[in-house]
Amino acid sequence: MELVNKKPSSLVDIKMHYCPGCGHGIVHRLIAEVMDELGIRERTVGVAPVGCAVFSDDYFNCDMIQGPHGRGPAIATGIKRSQPGCIVFSYQGDGDLASIGMAETVHSAARSENISIIFINNAIYGMTGGQMAPTTLIGQPATTCPKGRDPKVNGYPIKVCELLSQLDGARFLERTSVSTAQGVIKTKKAIKKAFQNQIEGKGFSLVEILSMCPTNWGVTPLQGLKFVDEKMMPLYPLGVFRSPEQEGGQK
Amino acid sequence: MPEIRVDETRCKGCELCTKACPKSCIEMSDTFSVTGYYPAKLAKTDCCIGCGLCAQICPDLAIAVWK
């Protein structure tokens, strides 16, 4: 008998603080596995966000920096431009990237900065207590809209991949999900491609990952998987929105 | 025969692995772990095929797949 799934060396072997059924742990493991497979751990710098993943610098076994809310792409830009040999990734949630950090995200994509962004979309603010995020679905309850998001008052959800796909600078955009084991495998491929693009100097890559937040959705972890599949996927369809191979083309 | 070994100190009892298992081999234990959760366990013998899908979806790296 031999162990099939060895723990990635790019992840520190400690317990994570995330809630049961949270998608952050899965994505952390995938990023660490990709770093191991590409052999880039020694020269990788990660940018931790504000949000539940603020402590991800405790978990990733590479250089990490923690930035102010939403400023991940700006910090990653600075690191990449001053240290072009480094592989720089920014790990961000939806409240972080699509709300306060929207300007940084859009402009780093427009400039086609050679960085990789891992964007966790769980349709809610997690750490701060389940407030409505820009990606919260219509009718979805949150602590700041207890009766559900009303488009007349709160507007409509932002689809980040569709939005950024209009920009010529955004070279690789893919939306995946970690609600099934098959989706996890696809997500790993997408993350690997985002890092490979950066190694090959192809420019801005962003992977949007639909993830679960059972605690703030007020459901069990298994119901959380169902919520992603049945409620989020119709609004946020999975797929590749831009890739360096199909220049200028939208899916 | 392949098998999984669940690290009970890491498992948070989220049950995602029970849904990911194509053979429905995994069930939740009915006794508490030291961390206060009902951890997952391999419920049936000669059931696991070692596909590793449970380990893919486990958010806490609690499942080791042995083949």
Image (cartoon, coloured by chain):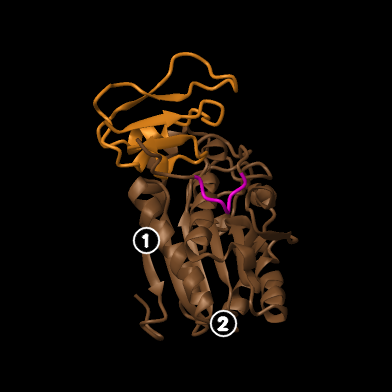
Chain colours: A brown, B orange
* Residue A37 x %, y %: 47, 61
* Chain letter of disc 2 in the image: A
Q: Residue furthest right?
A: A68
Which quadrant of the figure contains the C terminus of chain A? Answer: bottom left
**Is residue A202 found inside the magenta-colored segment of the image?**
no
The residue positioned 52% from the left and 57% from the top of the image is A31
Q: Indicate the amino acid at tag 2.
A: Ser
Secondary structure under tag 2 reads: loop
The residue positioned 64% from the left and 53% from the top of the image is A61
Q: Residue furthest top?
A: B31
Which quadrant of the figure contains the N terminus of chain A? Answer: top left
The residue positioned 53% from the left and 61% from the top of the image is A35
| Residue that label 1 marks | A238
Q: Nearer the viewer, mark 2 or mark 1?
A: 2
- Determine which quarter of the picture holds residue A84: bottom right
Against A224, is A251 above or below?
Answer: below
The residue positioned 47% from the left and 24% from the top of the image is B39
Against A76, is A81 above or below?
Answer: below
Q: Is residue A135 visible?
A: no
* Residue B42 x %, y %: 35, 25
> Range of the magenta residues?
A7-12
Q: Is residue B39 visible?
A: yes
Q: Indicate the amino acid at tag 1.
A: Leu
| Residue that label 2 marks | A112
Magenta-colored segment: predominant secondary structure: loop
**Is residue A10 found inside the magenta-colored segment of the image?**
yes
Is A34 placed left or right of A51 in the picture? left
Secondary structure under tag 1 reads: loop
Is A169 placed left or right of A107 in the picture? left
Q: Who comes first in sequence, dot 2 or dot 1? A: 2
